[in-house]
Amino acid sequence: MRLPRFYCPGPLAAGARLALPPDAAHHALRVLRMKQGEALLVFDGQGREFRAQIHSIQRAEVMVTVEDATGSDREPPLPVILAQGISSGERMDYTLQKAVELGVTEIWPIAAERSVVRLMGERAEKRLLHWRRVVIAACEQSGRSRLPRLLPVQPLADWLDGFSGHGVVLDPRAEQNLSACPRPAGASSALVGPEGGLT
């Protein structure tokens, strides 16, 4: 049976005792109904993963003892940057989840002209915190040991001004398939529009 995995921002080291973050503790106790002495995996989001065991449970706090490193780094060899036009409702969550599972290394939420959702100020900050939780959960589920970098929301024009390197624009009317593009030497960027497409 596969061990449950939890993100624990470092530093992680064999022999350390630490508390699971609140979201992870809630999931371990309320969803998985884990008990003292059960085994799990913890990862720091920087590529290190360790076996661990639940040492104690005090109300909502779960203390774990970190054991040995697993030595597994499941990151893809080609860094991929996703510039994603913000979509509405659960569509954005689903997009981020699948992008993380597929190995995207960096995510730029883009406010495009035809974006249905408009995020500014405090609303944008709250949405970023929510998306970060989606990214963490996708890493926990998919076995990735590195958290993709999630950048603040920015207008498409600003992202394009700062863009350099190899990239593709995904368009359902394109005449060339992605498989026909040459393999990039370094990081590659994919720009995906929102529901209304890109102007």
Image: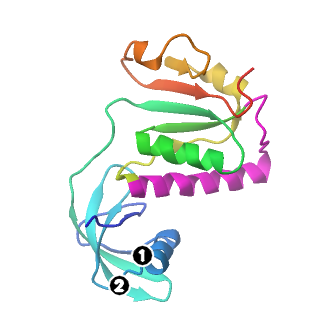
Q: Nearer the viewer, residue 101 or 57?
A: 101
Locate the N terminus and report the quarter of the image it occupies.
Answer: bottom left
Query: Viewed as shown, does residue 190 lie left or right of 4?
Result: right
Q: CA distance from mark 1 to mark 2?
A: 9 Å
Q: Position of residue 4 (x, y in %)?
A: 34, 67
Q: Residues within 10 Å of mark 1 (few under 14, many from 20)?
A: few
The type of residue carrying mark 1 is: Leu
Q: Nearer the viewer, residue 63 or 178?
A: 178
Query: Magenta segment: does it hold 75?
Result: no
Where residue 175 sits, quadrant-wise, is top right
Residues rendered magenta in the picture: 112-141
Name the residue carrying label 1: 32
Name the residue carrying label 2: 35
Query: Viewed as shown, does residue 85 lie left or right of 117?
Result: left
Q: Nearer the viewer, residue 97 or 107?
A: 97
Q: Secondary structure at mark 2?
A: loop
- Contact between marks 1 and 2 (CB within 8 A): the answer is no
